Image (spheres, rainbow, N blue to C red):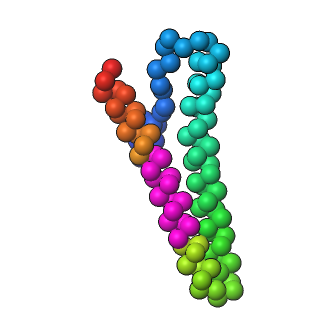
C-alpha cells in the first residue's frame, strides 16, 4: 500500500516556457492536488461530524444528508487519486 501511495506524483513537462511562467506553473501543479485532497478530507470530516450530530439528535434527514456527503467526499478523493495515478502512468508510457 505504501509503495502504491509513493508511486503517485505529478511531474509535467514545462520545457520551452519562460522562467517566470515555469516557476508559477510548477508551484500550481505541486499544490493543486494537495488542495483538492485537503478539501475532500474536510468534506469527510464535516460529514462525520454531522453523522454524530444526527445520531445524538435522532434526526434521520440529517443522517441521510451526511451519508450522502460522506459518499461524495470519498468518491471525489478516489477520483482525484485515480486521475493522478493514470496521468503518471500515461506520462511514463510515452517517455
* Outermost residue to the bottom: 58
Q: Is residue 69 magenta?
A: yes
Measured along the vertical axis of the image, is residue 33 above or below residue 60?
Answer: above
Q: In the image, what residue occupies the spot 48% across and 26% down?
A: 11
Measured along the vertical axis of the image, is residue 47 above or below residue 60?
Answer: above
Q: Does residue 6 appear left or right of residue 18 in this picture? A: left
Q: Residue 20: image x %, image y %?
A: 65, 15
* Outermost residue to the left: 93
Q: Does residue 90 appear left or right of residue 57 in this picture? A: left
Q: In the image, what residue occupies the spot 34% across and 32% down?
A: 90
Residue 84 shows in this picture? yes
Q: In the image, what residue occupies the spot 54% across and 59% down?
A: 73
Quarter of the image for residue 55 reads bottom right
Residue 2 shows in this picture? no
**Where are the magenta residues, as a range?**
68-81
Q: Does residue 11 appear left or right of residue 69 in this picture? A: left
Quarter of the figure that contains the C terminus: top left
Measured along the vertical axis of the image, is residue 66 above or below residue 5?
Answer: below
Measured along the vertical axis of the image, is residue 5 above or below residue 28?
Answer: below
Q: Is residue 7 magenta?
A: no
Number of numbered callouts drawn: 0
Q: In the image, what residue occupies the spot 62% across and 69% down?
A: 48
Quarter of the image for residue 30 reads top right
Q: Residue 22: image x %, image y %?
A: 59, 18
Q: Residue 34: image x %, image y %?
A: 59, 41
Q: Residue 84: image x %, image y %?
A: 44, 39
Amino acid at each position: 500500500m505504501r509503495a502504491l501511495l509513493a508511486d503517485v506524483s505529478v511531474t509535467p513537462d514545462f520545457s520551452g516556457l519562460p522562467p517566470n511562467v515555469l516557476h508559477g506553473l510548477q508551484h500550481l501543479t505541486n499544490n493543486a492536488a494537495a488542495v483538492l485532497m485537503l478539501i475532500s478530507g474536510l468534506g469527510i470530516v464535516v460529514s462525520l461530524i454531522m453523522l454524530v450530530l444526527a445520531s445524538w439528535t435522532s434526526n434521520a434527514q440529517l443522517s441521510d444528508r451526511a451519508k450522502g456527503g460522506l459518499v461524495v467526499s470519498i468518491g471525489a478523493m478516489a477520483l482525484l487519486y485515480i486521475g493522478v495515478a493514470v496521468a503518471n502512468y500515461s506520462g511514463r508510457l510515452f517517455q
